[in-house]
Image (cartoon, rainbow, N blue to C red):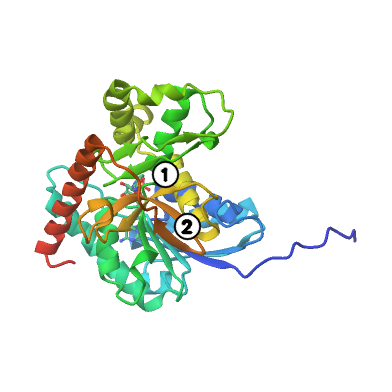
Amino acid sequence: MMQGAAPRQRREPVTVTVTGAAGQIGYALLPRIASGAMFGPDTPVRLRLLEIPAAVRVAEGVVLELEDCAFPLLAGADVFDDAAQAFSGANYAILVGARPRQAGMERADLLAANAGIFAPQGEAINEHAAQDVRVLVVGNPANTNALIAQAHAPDVPERRFTALTRLDHNRALAQIARRTGAGTDEITGLTIWGNHSSTQFPDVSQVRFAAGVQADIAALQDRQWLEDEFIPRVAKRGTEIIDVRGASSAASAAGAVVDHIHDWALGTPAGEWTSVGLLSHGEYGVPEGVFSSFPAISRAGDWQIVPDLELEDWARARIDASTDELVAERDAVRALGLV
Ligand code: NAX
């Protein structure tokens, strides 16, 4: 028999639980996690997938495909319809599965339906996940679902709960790159503030370009472009994708999940920040007790909100409008006794 190359030195596997694994984001996300895109080429992953009973077979089909990718880093993939089992030993929990808004559903109905998912999942994380568990909520309404899950996991440090706004961040980055001619990796200082909804505020006031870059930097001073094109396009990009693709964002959502957890686990690059939905303690005047998107850096596995950024008056008004919406969502779930 021929002698192959010596195996790489590998770390202990990381256990990642993904809910909604049979859905379209799941289908785009799971191969990327298993490929090593999330934790790097030396860290194996063990996947624990949660689905509702009716979708377990589909999730098992996705596992068959993962097997057929023969990923060297995939240390196992199992499907469950029970949250306690699915979250057992999870180092990372990615909560994608959610109830979509159906015709005739009021916002309170949507929040209540999702609370029925995120409250028990928060409890299961509290009871069964690993000590170092880190949680990312993707399923919408993501910010308030994160609040519900966090409120039901009192033993997990609150900063270990996050809501995904990295997709909005990446969408804004791509639009700035298009407008200025800079590469997406030559742009720093972007922030998404507020809710992952059409009220969000993509803020370019602190944007910086890499030294020597050939770009139309002055374009970002064009207030008319910012207000009439950039902000609405980023905030309504989800609807644009549905109109053009005929289905909601999946590959880009999966890409944003990979970026978010990658930076959380391995750190944001020196001198850069990203956008993360975090529980507010009044930073930047955002009301306490809502999950708002903030500028954040990750060091040693912890998110820290970037302090002391200047906010112009019009930015303040837009952030307030988005966080008012978050307060209204919080009050609605509070009225239902859910947080
Ligand atoms: P799909 O409808 O394709 O998949 C959702 C999956 O979740 C289904 O397979 C369903 O069976 C499962 N599910 C439902 N309840 C569950 C439960 N209690 N436990 C486990 N699994 C459960 O939706 P998909 O396109 O994958 O989107 C998933 C969620 O992501 C939606 O709520 C969507 O709105 C949200 N998004 C959030 C984004 C963000 O940036 N925060 C962007 C992308 C996406 O729109």
Residue closest to the eye, 173 or 34: 173
Task: Name the amino acid type tagged 1.
Answer: Ala
User: Quadrant location of the N terminus?
Assistant: bottom right
* Badge 1 element: helix
Task: Name the amino acid type tagged 2.
Answer: Ser
The quadrant in which residue 66 appears is: bottom right
Q: Residues within 10 Å of mark 1 (few under 14, many from 20)?
A: many
Q: Mark 1 near ligand 1 (CB under 8 Å)?
A: yes
Q: With 188 as the anchor, is 244 left or right in this view? A: left
Vertically, is 140 above or below 8? above
Q: Position of residue 297 (x, y in %)?
A: 45, 54
Q: Position of residue 42 (x, y in %)?
A: 66, 60
Question: Would you name the residue on which mark 1 appears?
Answer: 253
Residue closest to the eye, 11 or 20: 11
Measure the C-alpha gap from mark 1 to mark 2. Answer: 20 Å
**Of the two numbered discs 1 and 2 in the rendering, the one whose residue sits closer to the viewer:** 2
Q: Position of residue 192 (x, y in %)?
A: 34, 43
Does residue 114 show up? Answer: yes
Residue closest to the eye, 183 or 88: 183
Mark toward the start of the polypeptide (1 vs 2): 1
The quadrant in which residue 104 appears is: top left
User: Quadrant location of the C terminus?
Assistant: bottom left
Q: With 221 as the anchor, is 4 left or right in this view? A: right
* Badge 2 element: strand
Question: Would you name the residue on which mark 2 appears?
Answer: 298
Q: Position of residue 318 (x, y in %)?
A: 22, 39
Residue closest to the eye, 323 or 88: 323
- Which residue occupies 22% across, 35% down? 314
Vertically, is 95 above or below 185? below
Does residue 18 show up? Answer: no
- Which residue occupies 27% across, 47% down? 194
- Which residue occupies 31% across, 72% down? 153
